Amino acid sequence: MSQITFTIDLEDPTARYAPDGRHIAMTRRILDLCDEMRCRATFFVVGKLAQSAPKLIQDIAARGHEIAYHSHAHVPLTQENPARFREQTHADKHGLEQLIGKPVVGYRAPMFSLTPRSLWTVAILAELGFRYSSSVMPTRLSRFGFPNAPTVPFEWPNGMIEFPLPVATLHKNLRVPYLGGIYLYALPGVLTHRWLRQAKPEEVLWTYTHPYDFDSAEPYKPMPNTARGISMALWLARQVAEQKIRDVLKEQLTAPPLNERLTGHQLTRIDLGKSL
């Protein structure tokens, strides 16, 4: 049986980052779920959220979970400016490290937007001390897909490790994400568990969720920067999201946070200009 790491993209879909917003209560609900399931997770934190709720970030770390970084304001990398990205990322990383008293070594791009158009970020991340990224979606099924990327962990030329989004390969040109977001919530559970059993031993599996996925009582509101149909589908999926996450975590052997899975891999070093 494969091991799977639970990861959370810690963000506020309203983009207000109020210190008493619904996302705070939902994050604490996820923390209680982790305690119940006896798993330690990786929380990818938006910088603005850390600034608005520093005690929450400290509590997450104190309960044994990894704090990683999820951008300053959840802007896709394809809309970022390199100078602004470097400045904000440097400041936010330092702020998180001051809060928890530990290095922050993991990064996840908003909406998995590390694509051929935004590869400039890899050099900046390594320069700032990140050891791994979890930002590549190796599929054509998304506007931020990176269809030719490997489906197993690989190494960028500067030595930073990439943990790509787990996908099921149905055909060489058809890869389906299945362990997080709308993909996990909409797919039949029998398919999810079949693909988990078929995962290659060299894959690093992880499932991901968001605080709002657990908020089944919140009235519908369109999400920023999200197509209306997807926004509605994500809201409807809240009715099943928690149970889907529970089913996956119960079925698999729970792995430690991603920063504890950086060793023991046979990694291919990827040439940015040629291989992808």
Image (cartoon, grey):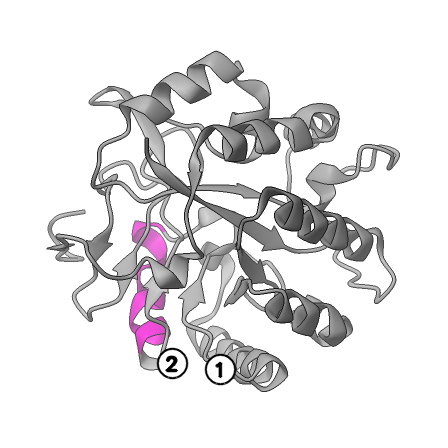
Residue 253, how many percent across, how many down?
41, 38
Decide if residue 8 is on the left or right side of residue 200. right
**Residue pictured at 60% horizontal, 58% vertical:** 74
Query: Which range is magenta?
Result: 115-126
**Residue pictured at 31% horizontal, 44% vertical:** 204
Residue 208, how many percent across, how many down?
53, 43
Q: Compared with residue 5, is residue 172 higher up or lower down, i.e. above or below?
A: above
Q: Compared with residue 20, is residue 138 higher up or lower down, i.e. above or below?
A: above
Q: Secondary structure at mark 2?
A: loop
The kind of residue tagged 1 is His
Circles 2 and 1, Cβ within 8 Å, touching? The answer is yes
The kind of residue tagged 2 is Leu
Seen from the viewer's position, the closer of residues 117 and 214 is 214
Kindly identify which residue carries mark 2: 128
**Residue pictured at 32% horizontal, 23% vertical:** 197
Q: Compared with residue 219, is residue 27 higher up or lower down, i.e. above or below?
A: below
* Residue 51 picture quarter: bottom right
**Tag 2: Cα neighbours inside 10 Å, few (<14), some, or many (≥20)?**
some
Kindly identify which residue carries mark 1: 90
**Distance from label 2 to label 1 (Cα)?**
6 Å
